[in-house]
Image (spheres, grey):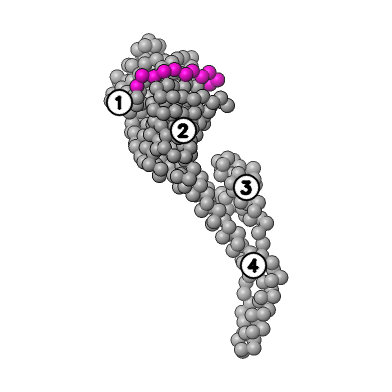
Amino acid sequence: MDINENILKWFNGEITDETAQQLLAAEEFEFYKKLKERTGRLALSPADLEANYKQIQHKKSKKGIIPLRPKTRWLPYVGIAASLALLFGLYQVFFYSQHLQTGVATTETLALPDHSIVTLDAGSEISYANAFTLNRKLKLNGTAYFEVQKGKTFTVCTEQGSVTVLGTKFDVISAPNYFQVNCYEGKVEVNTKGKKTILTAETSLTANGLHQKKVDIHHTTPQWMSGKTVFESTPYSVVIQSLEKRFGVSITFPEHYKNGLFTGGFPHDNLDKALQAVTLPLNLNYTINNKNVNLQP
């Protein structure tokens, strides 16, 4: 069942508010809840409709026309339908209605409506509104590099935090309990866990759980755009997740390695070389069975 069917069932009283809240994203639920409350108050006066009908009937009887009594029960819903159509259209314009997702081992570059450039790493996704030029705000899941045109505030929102800029070059890496922002040009404001940090050119912020670390960097573009992914004191689980996205494999490894910090990198052109790069420093062995990889001491 798609989102439109769920909304219609909710508006018709076929499902409860609690069920609708489970079926819809939080932002969508709040939007349609307000819409439902507003349309619930819409009604056309039955007295006016009846008076209009009698007036038409009287005029027609004078001309010798036998009138058919119209069924007017649907008329009160015309206004509701029109309001729904209008507000749904506004939702499509001002909310996250445009989506782009990259597959395994692919990066993709696109121009946003304001002419800013975004490059998505493998297994990443962005979404933004049709009216992006009016409100330069987008959602990111994964890793992306941005070259932002100067103008109104430009905000990248992730599950781990947000980045706000006016015009600059930076990338964002967002994973469960891990958030990294690298600023290559200009200045960005990073907001994560309620704490704001200003990054200038060639600086980086990493947030791992409740711990945050700001360091200098010595490259002017993301290294993952040049055929190699590099890590600096990064949780091993994030390293493995990046490898999985890059090569389209599923990797299992001992649980106690999950939060260990890894410094190093892996190439994008060969799975064996990549696995060697992330296992040898930890004295791990690996076996490959089709798309499944197992790491063991």
Disc 2 to disc 4, how far (Cα)?
A: 53 Å
Disc 1 to disc 4, how far (Cα)?
A: 65 Å
Q: Say few, some or many: other residues with alpha carbon within 10 Å of mark 2 (under 14 / 14 to 19 / 20 or more).
A: many
In the picture, the disc for residue 165 is 2
- Please determine whether, in this image, residue 18 is positioned above or below residue 241: below
Can residue 50 be seen here? Answer: yes
For badge 3, the amino acid type reads Lys
For badge 1, the amino acid type reads Gly
Q: Say few, some or many: other residues with alpha carbon within 10 Å of mark 1 (under 14 / 14 to 19 / 20 or more).
A: few
Quarter of the image for the C terminus: give it: top left
Which sits in the foreground, 70 or 53? 53
The residue beneath circle 3 is 33
Nearer-N-terminus badge (3/1):
3
The residue beneath circle 4 is 73
For badge 4, the amino acid type reads Arg
Nearer-N-terminus badge (3/2):
3
Disc 3 to disc 1, how far (Cα)?
A: 47 Å
Q: Where residue 213 sits: x, y (%)?
A: 49, 18
Is 215 in the magenta? Answer: yes
